[in-house]
Image (cartoon, grey):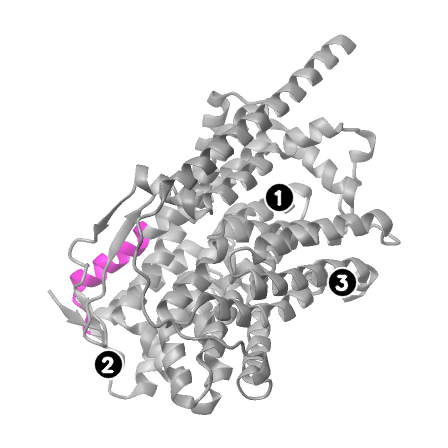
Amino acid sequence: MKWTQVIDPFHNIALSVLVAAVPILFIFWALIVKKMKGYQASLIATALAALLAVLVYGMPLKLAVLSIGHGALYGLFPICWLVIMSVFLFNLTVRSGQFEIIKHFMASITGDRRLQALLIAFSFGSFLEGTAGFGAPVAITAAMLVGLGFNPLYASGICLIANTAPVAFGSIGIPITVASQVSDIPEMPISQMVGRTLPILSIILPCYLVTLVAGFKRATEVFPAVLVSGASFAFLQWFSSNYLGPSLPDVIAGLGSIICLMVFLRFWKPKAVWRFANEPAPTFVTTTYTSGQVLRAWSPFIVLTIMIIAWGLQPIKDVLNSWVFFQFEVPGLHNAILGQDGNPIPKIFKVNYLSAAGTAILIADLIAIPLVGLTYREGARVFVDTLNQLKFPILTIAAVLGFAYIVNDSGITLTLAAVLANTGSWFPFFAPVLGWLGVFITGSDTSANALFSKLQYATAQTIGVDPVVTVAANVSGGVVGKMISPQSIAVAAAAGDLVGKESQLFRFTVAHSFLMLVIICFITLAQAYAITWIIPTYEMLTSKKAVAVPDLSAGYAYLLILALLLVVFSVVVRRIARRRKETSALAG
């Protein structure tokens, strides 16, 4: 069975766009107006998209069902796999009592909720985005803030908003790598162009977050700290993206802003510590923890950081994939859909369960269980509780990815893109909207770049604008769509204990998403016509690189170093714990 995608089913692009927008408009209506639960809105939107695909676009029913199934399968792996393991890690620290020590540590740096939001949601979240991505940063940071005493809605909402600036360079730069592969523009100029757009957002974002948490007046009271956080992050993001490439900006900028803010707070404190209204008085002042206890409490997140950095290294990925990696053509769907160019669209499902980020977090979980003082039997119970906690988010994420795949495969997404591509000289203004739309639908800047980078390139050439401007705009526009993507909402709701209240979270973030999108649209328009000197010079990729057989020796060496590092760290933490027990026994 072969079927060709249709872009204009009514032979009237205006009417086709109105009909194609129905499932997406439904999601907005369901979450904002009707306040539906996330899984209900996602399932109904998927059914609507399938009806349009079959009845309007002429997609065979079999292909529509297979497309939804393919998306749902991808939602379960690797997305849900990662989310489950991330929340499991956090739950282990809570069940063991170690999170109480983490809360004390954060309060010892600062008891001010405004500054805690900067450290965790913005800086630590950016670091995690650079290493793991795909939902892990929001899941971990939202859960941490809730554990510290933040209102769950605010915790999840500000973590979603904070996750905008780093998304373009997430997962060791994968979104930009994909944009390069699809558009044939080298990675470096795309990285440079994005790195000359997003630092503007990065320097604004900390103030924006603190204003959301405490109001503008209270935000001005910590403006020096906000400036240090935002300026250090923006500078390091600009520098690394322009001179080192797309792999490390989030890691470098995230760590750099954490260090800069912690050092700054040693010399400067706000006049008054701000906490939420009606919040119980802090009790940590009566408890003193040793540095060893603090190290043990943080050990799960330290192991997590080591693991996801290691798993992001290509030599290690190559080794892991050489051990266990298989892929299969989706039966009945592979090459069954023909694109507008007449070429069949491959549908291959890759099962890289060893090199997946979720597996790195699982290993961190297993290492962390004895480090935090739990038995593996107790850890297993925590895991069962975590699965029960996430049952509705898992359903939501599977439904959302099924929705994303059916709208892409049927041509619905291409219909919406076509109208934006016909805006002529105004296209640079609307180029970020394509990225925003792609991320809203798929939940991934990587997927949005795979969808629209070629369209961005071709349209820019047609109107005489440098294609790197619009391809980079697709990347930059996508980052502000992340906070309202149903997939991201589901992840944040799960981490923030807001399951069934996804509509509240969506309404919390949607206005901020539109505002930031407009800012990026104007920046892109200026880059295209007014400040063209900002565009990097580059040469197009003239030919595809030959796929070389990877040299696995480096990967094995890295894995050996990783194993030794984890063993040494585990021994140190266990000895600290044992010494603490012996001291307590003698004191008793």
Residue 551 rendering spot, x and y as whole percentages = 36, 44
Nearer to the camera, 436 or 174: 174
Q: Quadrant of the C terminus?
A: top right
Nearer to the camera, 331 or 211: 331
Q: Earlier in the sequence, mark 3 or mark 2?
A: 2
Q: Quadrant of the N terminus?
A: bottom left
Left or right of 109 in this view: 414: left
Q: Which residue is the site of mark 3?
A: 227
Q: Element under label 2?
A: loop
Q: Judge depth for marks 3 and 2 and give the one in front.
A: 3
Q: Which residue is the site of mark 1?
A: 144
Residue found at the far left of this picture = 1
Q: Earlier in the sequence, mark 1 or mark 3?
A: 1
Q: Which residues are magenta?
A: 58-73
Our reading of the magenta stretch's main secondary structure is helix
Q: Which residue is the site of mark 2?
A: 9
From the viewer's perspective, is residue 298 above or below residue 48?
A: above
Nearer to the camera, 244 or 373: 244
Residue 97 rendering spot, x and y as whole percentages = 63, 29
Residue 251 rendering spot, x and y as whole percentages = 58, 52
Which amino acid does the dot numbered 1 rest on?
Met
Residue 582 rendering spot, x and y as whole percentages = 70, 12
- Residue occupying the point 72% across, 42% down: 106
From the viewer's perspective, is residue 225 above or below residue 566?
A: below
Residue 488 in sight? yes
Q: Element under label 3?
A: helix
